Image (spheres, rainbow, N blue to C red):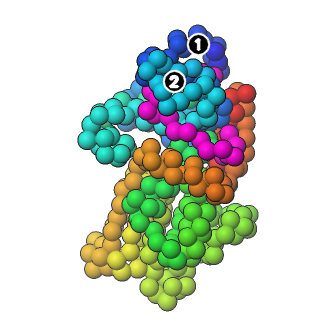
Amino acid sequence: MKSLQLIEEKKLELVDGPAPDAPAETEVQVAMKSIALNHIDVWGYRGMAFAQRTLPIVVGAEGVGEIVAIGSGVSNFKPGDKVALYGGKTCGHCPACTEGRDNLCENIAGVMGFHVDGMAAELINIEARLVIPIPDGISWTDAACAPVTFSTVEHMLFDNAKLKRGEKILIHAAGSGIGSTAIRMAKDLDCEVFTTVGSDEKVEKAKALGADHVINYNEKRFESYVRRQTGKKGVDVVFEHIGPDTWAGSIFALKRGGRLVTCGSTSGVSAETNLFSVFQQQLHIFGSFGASMRNVADGLDKMARGIRPVIDSEFDVGDLQSGLDRLINRQVFGKVVIHMG
Ligand SMILES: [Zn+2]
């Protein structure tokens, strides 16, 4: 069985090894079809100080496949079912897990593809409680963007920021996987969408996605533009994942009582915050990481009714490095998807 492994930092290798045993009582065995790449793959590839792991490790944190065998105790799935895999090794029995807040599990044993072996393998055994059925009519390519990308955006916009129909929202980095997804989900609610991009080429692509205002952050200050366009009031919601490069402007772009939700910090780890703005403007700041299993299912349902991910490019598993390079070099517009072949 082939799997793509990180042998050492910044060195990927397609490895031929033994296939997994038959699935245990509560497990299913999945033939993996497609993997979507995320920034967590870049962090994993470069090696992050906080990651406790032992190399080599199978990469891939977001993926989908077809069930080929089930354990003796599994009754809700059968071979042939198409499923999305939840990448967090949750315990399933702590208060957070039993309340459906899976990403707050108190005993999480790691994130697949980052701390523990991931999804870029021909066959995987996984607990049946950690797979989510894929509705009919969704391609493998699109479905591969549900377990992390769509679910992360669901969790940010609806569980945390509680985005409502018709609100004004600033979404950073239209070209990113979550940025492009957030634009489509916000436009589905008839929101007025402001978004940022880093090049003129991406301006047109962001407009084509439905964004009402596209700001090239290399040419003008997005926060001034947003305030001008909203009668100096600011937006209801800011969708953050950039960090120090945009943080102060994002705070400034919010209206009184506005909500900022962040799930990432690709430009660094620390940023200054104007505390007067936070309390005088009565801002709400939400930290968001990952998503629940329900968010994955909700994301798949949205795909089934036509909200599709933006696909930047597709590669075979042996060429995952090319996809990763597009992410590292910020060339992407949308998702990079890898096929197991
Ligand atoms: Zn738990």
- Residue 280 lies, in percent from the top left, at 27, 80
User: What's the magenta region?
Assistant: 120-142
From the Cβ of disc 1, is ligand 1 less than 8 Å away? no
N-terminal of the pair, mark 2 or mark 1, is 1
Q: Nearer the viewer, mark 2 or mark 1?
A: 2
Taking the spot 73% from the left edge, 36% from the top edge, the residue there is 315
- Kindly give the residue lying farthest to the bottom in the view shown: 231
Image position of 1 (left or right of 150): right
Q: Nearer the viewer, residue 282 or 192?
A: 192
Q: Amino acid at mark 2?
A: Val
Residue beneath disc 2 = 28
Q: CA distance from mark 2 to mark 1?
A: 14 Å
Marker disc for residue 334: none
Left or right for 67, reference 99: right
Of the residues shown, which amino acid type is indicated by label 1? Ala
Label 1 Cα neighbours within 10 Å, binned few <14 / some 14-19 / many ≥20: some
Q: Between residues 269 and 144, which one lies in front from this camera angle?
A: 144
Visible residue check, residue 153: yes
Q: Residues within 10 Å of mark 2 (few under 14, many from 20)?
A: many
* Residue 265 x/y as whole percent: 45, 53
Q: Position of residue 198 (x, y in %)?
A: 63, 63
- At a point 45% along the width and 48% down the height, the residue shown is 294
Nearest the camera: 31 or 226? 31
Would you say residue 10 is visible in this rendering? no
**Residue depicted at x 41% and y 26%:** 53
Q: Residue at x 34, y 34 (%)?
A: 92
The label on residue 19 is 1
Q: Nearer the viewer, residue 52 or 237?
A: 237
Residue 290 position (above or below residue 208)? above
